[in-house]
Image (tube, rainbow, N blue to C red):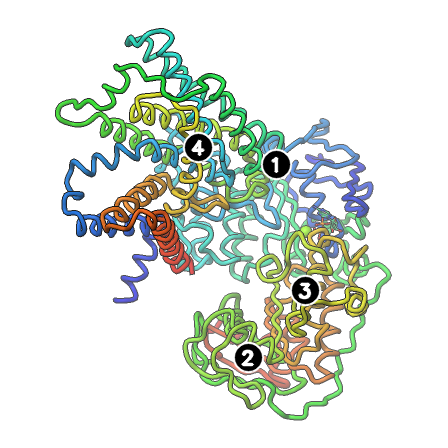
């Protein structure tokens, strides 16, 4: 009986590789609540989500390329580019409703174009993803700096007011999050994501099995570009201004979140929900370090160590489950 | 009328000629066997037909019309599907997803129609339900399956595409007897329905059971095509190996000094239970039985790859408490697995780098003189009759049989005391097998003790002094002397 229980839980982890990270997340929420009882209220959880929504979306974007065993180090650059483009656009044409909507369309197009460039150099020209996207990230960042050399241009009021507004007593970010989760839910059941994962499991196998490996990888980058753009919208709502360097720090966090969420950088196995949980883990570790009262000069070190420990726990559980 | 015709195909990989001006023609309702030693070009030919590899020269005709096949998608559209020797499945995807991967049923434009998928997959699952094992289900991720079950998934994948032409490149290499029988029933049915099938196997009895025609390849060339009813096993073997002769000196000088080299008492572990056996110096003992009855797990546990649950292992008279591969190597144990990809080769590295890791480990030197040790490798490789152009060649450019010889050389250069052979000749050709076993015999004469697990009963019966038959993780029978025959082995294997 005992053995049976163990088997069931292992089965669960195999089928839902993000379960270890979910457990870590719950432990972190409880720890946060222990040191700072206020942090467990609805209000502060909404605050947590709203602070990290942009990064969550970026982790989602990253997950779709990691699925096909690629990596995109340009997502931060894309965020910066989309952020400054839409802010400059709204600034130039005034902040009316139509202009705001047009700017969103513009942002999506830019994101997808960036994805297309990445897909082209990585999947069609066959450059190493890690190096090629690093190069394109510099290119995107350069474009962003050209569009807006200094940070500080404010976004249209309408834009960020909407972002912070409550509708029927529920904050806008919750609607946004629900919509995104719904989208992800359907994507997860799609043929495309299944193919993406199969391609990531091994290019040669997938090719010989009759899949179009190149096209699939390019589409993965397109999807990544799309979600990066959406992430940039959230960031713009959150900061209410344009900043050509805003995405810089987010790239590697998005990669870390994917791994924290149980994704394998070698491809074939990654979970979008897991990556979102990964972001929340990073966020909660940051706030926990603060609540414990770590002296400021030690905060980075403790944060780094804690993320490392969370990674190790997740990987340990997954290895146990595979054995 | 010939359905598929391949004309004057040639293919080179760098300096290696994989195919030289080959012609082959397959009729409707025909099972066409390809046979040839490892590296003779069978897989390359299949891959060219299925679009995975491009020929340098030559043409492909389907129903007398010339076709250009640029990739596997083209070939699928022309009605060709392929079982790839190295399998084309995605490890993290489930069985049913894999079976229909290139053609997942959909609803609402982009969602997978799970119900339809399950129903279509069930049809193929039911074909193998009784032989695939209990832990085989449609929702299992392939990564959790055994090798034989994975091959079944790849077979199902080909069946699901339901194309007029089906190519099977060594589909039975990991299957047990009942699975092969089940597969052959399906093949014969397909033939009746008018499908054309290319089938590759190294097992003679299989070839004669299902084949209509046989094409023999040797050294990248097609030697002959005949009706199977017109040739016999002897002719086939002679054509395959050409001038090389296969005579083996099986008589070993009986130098058994009757001192035990390795003793196992009540060993329990994953997939096996309460195993006790003793092996003398210079003895070859076989462990037999159906596929996957714990033989491989036992060898892996002795070597320390898998943990043991209880029981003792003695080497000579020293007890081996905690096992680990490193410790075992220090005690003179060697483990050679037939699963080269998983346990053997370092892909992407040279032959040299593939041969020396154990040597370096045993000698515990930080620096070494490459020119000083290279002859050691060359000698051992020559002893094994390995074919290679340079020791700096990348190992994956060699054929399977030659890769296996490199792995064996890795262990031989340091004179092992005990060899654990885990189906060492799996998927290698007859002449390489002969080389391998004559070497094993020589080693035994020199006093090396050998435990041999082989999925080929013929091999087991021929080469081992005693055979322990495994059934469901336990030793059910010990066959010695005149008892050591096929009948007794089968009886003990199939006994429940
Ligand atoms: N990708 C490759 N790169 C270099 N050489 C290869 C490659 N694939 C096969 N070869 C070589 O081509 C020859 C034929 O191999 P193969 O068709 O796999 O033989 P078989 O299937 O009959 O064992 C072998 O000598 C092998 O080493
Ligand atoms: Mg082959």
Same chain for mark 1 and mark 2? The answer is yes
Q: Earlier in the sequence, mark 3 or mark 1?
A: 1
Residue for point 57% across, 59% down: B342
Q: Quadrant of residue A254?
A: top left
Q: Is mark 3 within 8 Å of ligand 1?
A: no
Give me the C-alpha separation between circle 2 and circle 3. Answer: 26 Å
| Labelled disc at residue A80 | none
The residue singled out by tag 3 in the image is: B407
> What's the mark number on residue A248?
4
Vertical order, B178 against B380 (above or below): above
Q: Which mark is residue B80?
A: 1
Q: Nearer the viewer, residue A85 or B97?
A: A85
Residues under numbered marks 4 and 1 in contact, where contact means CB atoms less than 8 Å apart: no
3D distance between C-alphas at marks 4 and 2: 64 Å
> Dot 1: what SS?
strand
Q: Secondary structure at mark 4?
A: loop
């Amino acid at each position: 009986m005992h053995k049976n229980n163990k088997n069931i839980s292992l089965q669960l982890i195999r089928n839902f590789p993000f379960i270890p990270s979910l457990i870590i997340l719950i432990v972190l929420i409880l720890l946060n609540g222990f040191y700072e009882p206020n942090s467990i209220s609805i209000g502060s959880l909404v605050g947590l989500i709203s602070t990290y929504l942009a990064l969550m979306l970026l982790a989602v974007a990253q997950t779709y390329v990691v699925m096909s065993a690629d990596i995109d180090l340009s997502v931060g650059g894309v965020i910066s580019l989309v952020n400054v483009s839409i802010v400059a656009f709204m600034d130039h044409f005034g902040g009316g409703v139509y202009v705001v909507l047009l700017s969103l369309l513009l942002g999506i197009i830019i994101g997808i174009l960036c994805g297309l460039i990445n897909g082209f150099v990585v999947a069609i020209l066959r450059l190493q993803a890690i190096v090629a996207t690093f190069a394109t990230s510099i290119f995107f960042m350069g474009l962003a700096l050209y569009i807006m050399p200094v940070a500080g241009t404010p976004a249209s009021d309408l834009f960020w007011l909407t972002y912070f507004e409550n509708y029927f007593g529920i904050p806008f970010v919750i609607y946004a999050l629900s919509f995104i989760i719904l989208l992800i839910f359907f994507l997860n059941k799609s043929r495309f994501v299944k193919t993406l994962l199969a391609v990531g499991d091994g290019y040669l196998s997938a090719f010989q099995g009759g899949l179009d490996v190149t096209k699939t990888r390019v589409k993965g980058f397109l999807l990544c570009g799309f979600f990066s753009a959406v992430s940039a919208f959230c960031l713009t709502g959150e900061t209410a201004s344009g900043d050509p360097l805003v995405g810089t720090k987010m790239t590697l966090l998005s990669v870390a979140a994917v791994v924290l969420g149980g994704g394998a950088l070698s491809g074939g196995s990654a979970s979008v929900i897991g990556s979102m949980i990964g972001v929340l883990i990073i966020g909660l570790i940051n706030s926990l370090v603060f609540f414990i009262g770590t002296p400021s000069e030690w905060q980075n070190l403790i944060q780094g160590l804690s993320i490392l420990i969370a990674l190790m726990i997740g990987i340990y559980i997954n290895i146990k489950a595979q054995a | 009328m010939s359905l598929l015709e391949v004309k004057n195909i040639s293919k080179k990989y760098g300096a290696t000629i994989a195919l030289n001006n080959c012609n082959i023609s397959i009729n409707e309702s025909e099972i066409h066997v390809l046979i040839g030693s490892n590296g003779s070009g069978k897989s390359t030919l299949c891959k060219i037909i299925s679009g995975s590899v491009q020929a340098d020269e030559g043409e492909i005709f389907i129903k007398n019309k010339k076709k250009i096949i640029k990739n596997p998608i083209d070939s699928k559209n022309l009605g060709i599907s392929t079982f790839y020797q190295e399998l084309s499945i995605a490890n993290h995807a489930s069985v049913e997803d894999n079976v229909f991967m290139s053609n997942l049923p959909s609803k609402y434009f982009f969602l997978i129609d799970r119900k339809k998928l399950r129903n279509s997959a069930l049809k193929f699952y039911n074909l193998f339900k009784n032989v695939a094992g209990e832990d085989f289900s449609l929702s299992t991720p392939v990564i959790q399956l055994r090798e034989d079950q994975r091959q079944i998934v790849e077979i199902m994948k080909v069946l699901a595409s339901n194309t007029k032409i089906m190519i099977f490149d060594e589909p039975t290499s990991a299957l047990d007897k009942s699975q092969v029988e089940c597969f052959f029933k399906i093949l014969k049915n397909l033939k009746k329905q008018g499908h054309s099938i290319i089938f590759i196997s190294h097992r003679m009895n299989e070839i004669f059971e299902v084949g209509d025609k046989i094409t023999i390849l040797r050294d990248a060339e097609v030697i002959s095509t005949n009706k199977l009813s017109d040739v016999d096993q002897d002719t086939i073997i002679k054509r395959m190996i050409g001038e090389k002769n296969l005579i083996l000196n099986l008589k070993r000088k009986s130098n058994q000094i009757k001192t035990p080299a390795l003793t196992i008492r009540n060993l329990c572990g994953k997939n096996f239970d309460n195993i006790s056996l003793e092996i003398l110096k210079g003895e070859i003992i076989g462990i037999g039985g159906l596929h996957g009855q714990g033989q491989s797990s036992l060898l892996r546990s002795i070597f320390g790859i898998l943990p043991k649950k209880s029981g003792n292992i003695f080497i000579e008279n020293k007890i081996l408490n905690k096992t680990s591969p490193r410790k075992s190597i220090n005690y003179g144990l060697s483990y050679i697995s037939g699963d080269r990809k998983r346990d053997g080769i370092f892909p992407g590295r040279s032959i040299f780098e593939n041969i020396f890791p154990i040597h370096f480990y045993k000698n515990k030197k930080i620096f070494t003189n490459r020119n000083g040790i290279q002859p050691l490798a060359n000698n051992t490789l020559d002893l094994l009759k390995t074919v290679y152009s340079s020791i700096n060649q990348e190992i994956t450019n060699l054929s399977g049989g030659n890769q296996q010889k490199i792995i064996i050389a890795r262990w031989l250069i340091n004179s092992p005391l005990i060899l654990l052979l885990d189906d060492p000749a799996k998927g290698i050709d007859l002449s390489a097998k002969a080389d391998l076993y004559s070497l094993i015999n020589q080693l035994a004469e020199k006093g090396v003790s050998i435990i041999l697990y082989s999925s080929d009963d013929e091999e087991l019966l021929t080469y081992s002094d005693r055979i322990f038959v495994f059934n469901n993780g336990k030793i059910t029978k010990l066959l010695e002397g005149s008892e050591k025959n096929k009948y007794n082995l089968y009886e003990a294997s199939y006994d429940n």
